[in-house]
Amino acid sequence: MTKYIFVTGGVVSSLGKGITAASLGSLLKRRGFKVSILKMDPYINVDAGAMSPFQHGEVFVTWDGAETDLDLGHYERFIDEAISAKNSCTTGKVYSAVIQREREGGYNGGTVQVIPHITNEIQDRILAVGEDNDIVISEIGGTVGDIEGLPFLEAIRQLSVRVGKENILYCHVTLVPYIAASGELKTKPTQHSVNELRRIGIQPDVIVCRSQYTVGPDLREKIGLFCSVAPECVVEAKDSDSIYRIPEVLHEQGFDSMVLKKLGLPADKEPDMKDWQEFLRRYDSLTGEVTVALVGKYTEIKDAYLSVNEALAHAGIANGVKVKVMPVEAEDLVTGNPSDILSCADAILVPGGFGQRGVEGKILAAKYARESKKPYFGLCLGMQVAAIEFARNVLGLEEANSLEMDENTVHPVIHLMDEQKNIVDIGGTSRLGAYPCDIAEESKSAKIYGSLSISERHRHRFEFNNEYIEMFDKAGMKVAGICPVGGQVEILENVNHPWMIGVQFHPEFLSRPVRPHPLFKDFIAAAVKNAKI
């Protein structure tokens, strides 16, 4: 029988439910269990694809093409498993499915209600993930008490009846704030949070206390007493310098063993943490630093380029250096001097994006990188702007542009994909998910990957215009990767540059702490060489 763990949050949002779920998933997988993690988001949007980075942060794309919450990126990085569209469950998806079923006559003319129809749909989606796994960890987005989250909480309460309480564990993540005026940690917010959960009908089995400071045994005992939880089931998750320490922090407190015992699963086998511990050892022994200029238009938003930042960090640790990410607003390169802004960087990265704002600044970043010979890595739009810059300033096609930015350009070196031309809906209709790529044998990318055939994840509507391949090739911008399915250009390499690579895909989604992405790893190696560390 599959076991189900539900992670809820109380007091405030952004407490780290996702990291708690991911850390527990990592520990359980390393004990030999088949684990998957599901995110349940109360927002009415069907998915995260059309949501603003200012509000939502990055969109994480699954291998099968779902546009999801950034927490799914944490899940993949921690459990090292490619999770799918079914691991993302939003209110929008749930209601859409129920309404569609009602329209088709699936309820035999009955009245459709939140209970049982919405809650049943939520449960069915949880159980679907459980079909192929020993343990499913489900994170409930938002905070206990939020109106929009009530159907999800009711659904997981009902599920304990449906599958048996012995197969369910409720984990509540809550804040234990420090009040500077009194110099004390306060448990009352946790008590109120748990009471709110109990009013809904859910008694937590385990409480994870988030705090700036150590939550001592006395406080744990107090929390346990007032929340009807054994003191040993009150676990501390103090602020850390790295999210990647959390699995070990939880394991040292016996968190994973406690969870397994409560679920009636064997807890005698210790998790195999050798590679994780080696990663942390390398993290603690970094000796140098390189600066990477990240040129985007959401740089003030911490989570807008989360997977890129994590991939850079993984690559830095693999190279023995700390990567300092220098955020650069693309528009500042238009109003200012690119050399003055970018000269202190050891390498330049332009991430993916949509829309006209900031594009000319990104083109200037590519121009500066090409002329200064600094390592340049372009992701998705970052590849496209490098192509536009090359066309304008090397090929002499001064009006070259993308049709996304200029519908009337006489040199559309980037154009709209044929299959995108008649699409009206903007949500979930891009070229999404994993596609194959054949890599040219003598290319730099072939050496980096150590393979001539790869698969990477995509999220785009516009692509390199293949009519310009020959012209680019003759001038030194080589096509190093092509999709064998549709013929799309996937990788461009400037062979007259020490390290200038643009990719149409998003390699950041495949980077792992213990297995950094080869392109990012080599990019940082080039940055180290440029910095002469």
Image (cartoon, rainbow, N blue to C red):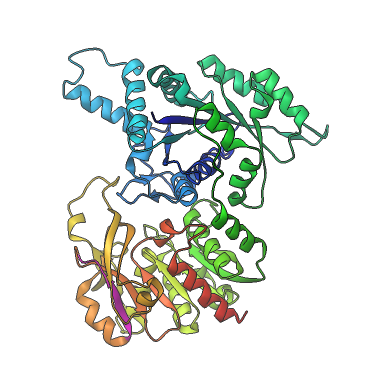
Res 351 → quadrant: bottom left
Which x, y percent locates residue 81? 41, 49
Of residues 295 and 19, the one drawn nearer to the viewer in this rendering: 19
Is residue 189 found left or right of 501 in the rendered image?
right
Image: magenta residue range: 476-484
Residue 294 in view here: yes
From what the image shows, is residue 273 above or below residue 231?
below
| Residue 214 highlighted magenta (yes or no) | no
Q: Quadrant of the N terminus?
A: top left
- Label count reads 0
Is residue 219 found left or right of 123 in the rendered image?
right
Of residues 524 and 382, the one drawn nearer to the viewer in this rendering: 524
Residue projecting furthest to the right: 182
Q: Quadrant of the C terminus?
A: bottom right
Q: Residue at point 43% right, 30% down?
A: 3
Q: Residue at point 32% right, 82% down?
A: 442
Which x, y percent locates residue 283? 62, 61
Residue projecting furthest to the top: 110
Res 346 → quadrant: bottom right
Q: What secondary structure is the stretch in magenta mostly built from?
A: strand
Residue 50 in view here: no
Of residues 194 and 55, the one drawn nearer to the viewer in this rendering: 194
Q: Residue at point 62% right, 63% down?
A: 282
Which x, y percent locates residue 309? 52, 59
Which x, y percent locates residue 70? 46, 46
Is residue 419 found left or right of 201 in the rendered image?
left
From what the image shows, is residue 199 above or below residue 317?
above
| Residue 482 highlighted magenta (yes or no) | yes
Is residue 398 found left or right of 18 in the rendered image?
left
